């Protein structure tokens, strides 16, 4: 019995121990479950961002996932623009916080549309900074870099090479690169190191519809005037030359049925504002009167109507400011046995008979003799209109002495002259003017003048209002009226000139003035637009692009004011009365226009001061002014709203 009791006691104790063990296991298991639940529900779940601890200065707001609107970006720059595979390319971007709150933002930089890296931007309200990033590409090609809505690009080129660019004033200029002939614009890979570019002093290229146009070399962008330049190419390199179109001023072209043909330069002589007449003893300047009108005869075979209109363009191809006041077309009907020409103008002298349409013989007489100032017989050169010119020199007195024959009894004597002039640049002209500051009363670049033989056998000057005019820069014909100038039956005439004037043809007409019918046509429409972009220093309030028809109806000091690259397209009605039987019709463009060039120290390359029809010179004296009345102020406020600031 005792043994049985002992066994029972042991069994109960064992059970109690077993129960304790089981209970302990349950407790431990429950604890593990609780720990696992806590870990799963708390530690593995996304946690809210704790609030920042207070600090003496405000902390940045949480970084937004989208670009804050208050951040503004500018000037994404890349350096270098070309690299070899594996070389670093650096980028910088200006960032401004235009708001009042602090901003912290990860700004993405993308290459070819794929985010390459992010850069942290931390800016207080109103602050700015420049952020930078570095890139490394190994494949040859061009890469587009974007950041903050800005874009730029860089290129990876073959190791040991870089791109050399040659750019000039217009496309098509010839040059040589290391002795090999090329044409502008040029871009090509060259070996790193020195390369030599040689350019011509004069380049001739085809300009759409204008034919072959000549350009004179001016300089490299570095300022060098050498025709040869060597570049040490150690990265992407630009070689830039500046050429100046021979001739200047707004250029006139006409629709010929298939395209536009070049006619000539509009008022390229006296339209140039700032012609110095002389210095006074006190050092002050006296300036010349600028006759504003040009009378340009058209080649009738080139003039073809289009949809009932004659179409013209007046384009500014040079770096100038032009003031186009009026344009009209004149159709002249005359007997078939005569020809018609008009006049040319000059500086200083106010010539009589300007704009007269003269009738001259269709069979002009040739001078008996023609001798230049060195005694050379130039009659063969001026006897035919053939583009074979006499020679001229800039800023040196020259002469052409003509014997125009025995014209005793002639009631009218007219010279028909075909000639051209080569002007220096505006800057060169201004420098020449200033050389005369210590020679008061002396005209630096005097206009031509004529002399006839007096009864005593000496040369005497003709009246100031009958002087020889200044030709156009392109070969063109005009009339010089000699009627009443010869005091005797000696019909010798000496033309004295200081500029580079070249004569192509001179003929003589004694035909009486014939009756003519003149049809004057004003523009049906005129539109100003930009033909090409430029890098001009001209500035001011230019005429807005668009319809300018109202401004060209009459010469009223309400100008179309334009600059290099601007073009005025003009239409005239071709609905004209029929030509009388046995007569023929010729056409002229009559334009009132002035222009400014860059380089005169006393004439700013700005729209103001404005010229005007009644001025006595330009610059004009202090007692004269552009008419700022209500009518002209309204014009200025309505039309001249294209503001271009000085660079």
Image (spheres, rainbow, N blue to C red):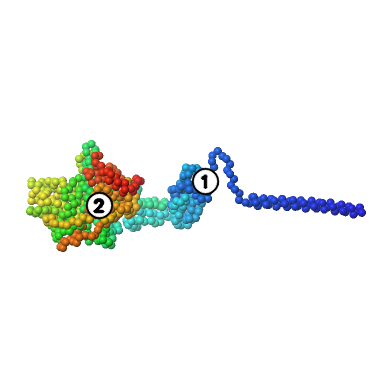
Q: Which residue is mark 1?
A: 104
Instruction: Give the x, y percent position of residue 521.
Output: 22, 56
Residue 258 in view (yes/no): yes
Q: How many marks?
A: 2
Q: Is residue 483 left or right of residue 40?
A: left
Towards the viewer: 451 or 594: 594
Q: At x 22% / y 45%, what residue is drawn?
A: 614
Q: Is residue 372 left or right of residue 566?
A: left
Q: Residue furthest right?
A: 1
Q: Quadrant of residue 387?
A: bottom left
- Where disc 2 sits, the SS reads loop
Towards the viewer: 334 or 240: 334
Mark 2 vs mark 1: in front: 2
Q: At x 11% / y 55%, what residue is drawn?
A: 512
- Where disc 1 sits, the SS reads strand
Towards the viewer: 426 or 87: 426
Mark closer to the chain start, 2 or 1:
1
Q: At x 10% / y 48%, what residue is drawn?
A: 453
Badge 2: how crowded within 10 Å, few (<14), some, or many (20+)? some
Residue 553: mark? 2
Q: Residue furthest top?
A: 282
Q: At x 47% / y 50%, what residue is drawn?
A: 148
Badge 1: how crowded within 10 Å, few (<14), some, or many (20+)? some
Instruction: Give the x, y percent position of residue 597.
Output: 28, 47
Residue 269 in view (yes/no): no
Q: Residue furthest front?
A: 630
Q: CA distance from mark 2 to mark 1?
A: 62 Å
Instruction: Give the x, y percent position of residue 266.
Output: 24, 52
Towards the viewer: 86 or 124: 124
Instruction: Give the x, y percent position of residue 36.
Output: 68, 52
Residue 259: mark? none
């Amino acid at each position: 019995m005792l043994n049985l009791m002992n066994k029972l006691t042991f069994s109960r104790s064992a059970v109690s121990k077993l129960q304790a063990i089981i209970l302990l296991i349950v407790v431990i298991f429950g604890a593990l479950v609780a720990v696992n639940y806590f870990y799963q529900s708390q530690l593995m779940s996304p946690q809210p961002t704790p609030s920042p601890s207070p600090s003496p200065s405000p902390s940045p707001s949480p970084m937004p996932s989208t670009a804050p609107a208050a951040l503004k970006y500018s000037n994404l720059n890349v350096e270098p623009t070309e690299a070899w595979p594996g070389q670093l390319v650096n980028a910088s971007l200006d960032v401004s916080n235009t708001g009042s709150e602090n901003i912290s933002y990860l700004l993405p930089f993308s290459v070819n549309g794929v985010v390459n890296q992010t850069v942290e931007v931390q800016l207080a309200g109103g602050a700015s900074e420049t952020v930078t990033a570095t890139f490394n590409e190994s494949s040859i090609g061009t890469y587009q870099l974007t950041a903050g809505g800005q874009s730029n690009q860089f290129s990876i080129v073959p190791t040991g090479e870089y791109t050399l660019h040659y750019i000039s004033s217009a496309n098509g200029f010839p040059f040589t690169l290391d002795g090999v002939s090329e044409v502008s614009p040029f871009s090509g890979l060259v070996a790193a190191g020195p390369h030599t570019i040689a350019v011509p002093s004069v380049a001739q290229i085809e300009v759409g519809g204008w034919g072959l146009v000549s350009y004179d070399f001016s300089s490299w962008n570095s300022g060098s005037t050498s025709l040869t330049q060597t570049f040490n190419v150690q990265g992407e390199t630009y070689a830039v030359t500046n050429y100046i179109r021979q001739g200047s001023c707004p250029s006139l072209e006409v629709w010929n049925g298939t395209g536009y043909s070049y006619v000539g330069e509009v008022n390229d002589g006296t339209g140039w504002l700032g012609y110095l007449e002389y210095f006074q003893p006190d050092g002050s300047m006296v300036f010349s009167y600028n006759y504003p009108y040009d009378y340009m005869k058209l080649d009738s075979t080139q003039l073809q109507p289009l949809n009932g209109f004659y179409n013209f363009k007046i384009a500014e191809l040079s770096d100038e400011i032009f003031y186009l006041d009026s344009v009209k077309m004149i159709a002249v009907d005359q007997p078939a046995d005569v020809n018609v020409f008009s006049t040319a103008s000059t500086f200083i002298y106010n010539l009589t008979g300007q704009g007269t349409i003269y009738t001259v013989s269709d069979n002009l007489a040739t001078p008996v003799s023609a001798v230049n100032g060195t005694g050379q017989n130039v009659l063969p050169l001026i006897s035919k209109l053939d583009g074979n010119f006499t020679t001229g020199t800039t800023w040196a007195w020259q002469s052409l002495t003509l014997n125009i024959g025995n014209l005793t009894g002639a009631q009218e004597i007219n010279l028909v002259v075909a000639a051209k002039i080569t002007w220096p640049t505006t800057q060169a002209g201004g420098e020449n003017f200033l050389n005369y500051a210590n020679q008061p009363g002396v005209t630096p670049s005097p206009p031509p003048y004529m002399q006839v033989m007096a009864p005593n056998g000496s040369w005497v000057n003709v009246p100031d209002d009958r002087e020889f005019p200044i030709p156009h820069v392109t070969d063109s014909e005009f009339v010089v009226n000699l009627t009443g100038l010869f005091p005797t039956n000696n019909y010798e005439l000496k033309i004295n000139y200081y500029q580079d004037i070249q004569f192509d043809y001179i003929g003589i007409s004694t035909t009486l003035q014939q009756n003519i019918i003149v049809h004057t046509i004003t523009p049906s429409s005129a539109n100003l637009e930009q033909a090409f972009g430029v890098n001009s220093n001209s500035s001011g309030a230019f005429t807005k692009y668009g319809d300018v028809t109202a401004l060209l109806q009459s010469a009223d000091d309400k100008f179309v004011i334009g600059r290099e690259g601007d073009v005025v397209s003009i239409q005239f009605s071709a609905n004209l009365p029929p030509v009388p039987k046995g007569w023929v019709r010729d056409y002229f463009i009559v334009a009132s226009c002035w222009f400014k060039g860059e380089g005169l120290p006393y004439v700013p390359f700005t729209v103001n001061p404005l010229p005007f029809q009644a001025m006595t010179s330009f610059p004009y004296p202090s007692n004269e002014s552009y008419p700022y009345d209500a009518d002209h102020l309204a014009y200025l406020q309505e039309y001249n709203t294209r503001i271009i600031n000085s660079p």
